[in-house]
Amino acid sequence: MNGFPNSATDAELEARAKELLSGTPKEPTSLSAEFRISFLQSYYTIDGIVCGNALYRLDLFNSFLDETALRKPDEWIEYNKSHHNDFVVAPAHLQFCMLKALYENREGPFKARIETLRTGLLRQCLEMWVATSTRILYSASGRDEIIHDYNVPGHQIGAINLKGNDDFLRNVPDEITQKIIGCDSKTANEVACWISGKGAYLWRRDTVGERTVTIGAYKCADRLGVTIGESLDLSSRAFGIHVVSKRPIGGAQ
């Protein structure tokens, strides 16, 4: 796969990504050696996003997807199927890792563009829930199933016990936040505080059956949150994200 044009070299990207994944980054508040963000007419291009064991280059549409359309989760999944080479609804962990990359580079050379995103598009998710392509299958007993890129070939599946009470994100076990939004609970809370000025909250359901994952906030809460038990009847807007390139780190698949 091609590298990241107009950014760091492949070797530099991979070395920094390995350092981040090891949990001992030399510069924990910056990815500036790899990170790059540019604006091209109607979308942002963001280089150097680490999600799982891969490096991503993403295009982020500068308004909500499909002219701010409201759709139910299954309708967004159908939208993804017919627009798979275009801007689509991304899974929860990729969306949050994108937010994390913006947060970690907020004081870097792209500070002004990041702040424009934070005060504009990103804060709009405080007005209503934003869709993801991640689903939760709650089981009657035992571990529940997480499906990223639901109903798309090559989707990722994980299993963990997700049932429990609502709580601040900083109190949620890292195992849960890592599987759902791709980072530990402390970092996730820092990202949310940067966007909304308040600590993040995790809403979940002690239930059985299929649910969707959304990112946003109840209007009365005025704080960013993640719900892992939202009804499939909920209509929501979506960020438009196009994966330009994805490259495994260190040969991981």
Image (tube, rainbow, N blue to C red):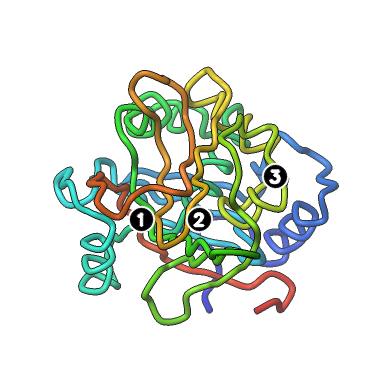
The residue that mark 3 highlights is: 184
Secondary structure of the residue carrying tag 3 is loop
**Given the current orientation, which residue lies at the most extreme front position?**
140
The residue that mark 2 highlights is: 94
Secondary structure of the residue carrying tag 1 is strand
| Viewport quadrant of the C terminus | bottom right
Q: Position of residue 120 (x, y in %)?
A: 33, 27
Mark 1 and mark 3 residues within 8 Å of each other at the beta carbon: no
| Mark sitting earlier along the chain (1/3) | 3
Q: Position of residue 87 (x, y in %)?
A: 28, 60
Residue 117: which disc? Answer: none
CA gap, disc 3 and disc 2 = 14 Å
Q: Is residue 108 above or below residue 184?
A: above
Q: Position of residue 43 (x, y in %)?
A: 30, 47
| Mark sitting earlier along the chain (1/2) | 2
Q: Amino acid at mark 3?
A: Asp
Mark 1 and mark 2 residues within 8 Å of each other at the beta carbon: yes
Q: Position of residue 146 (x, y in %)?
A: 53, 64
CA gap, disc 1 and disc 2 = 10 Å
For residue 113, side relative to residue 83 (left or right)? right
| Mark sitting earlier along the chain (3/2) | 2
The residue that mark 1 highlights is: 241
| Residue visible at 30% across and 33% down in the picture | 128
- Residue 188 figure quarter: top right
Q: Which of these two is toward me, 12 or 55?
A: 55
CA gap, disc 1 and disc 3 = 23 Å
| Residue visible at 19% across and 52% down in the picture | 71
| Residue visible at 55% across and 69% down in the picture | 3
For residue 179, side relative to residue 87 (left or right)? right
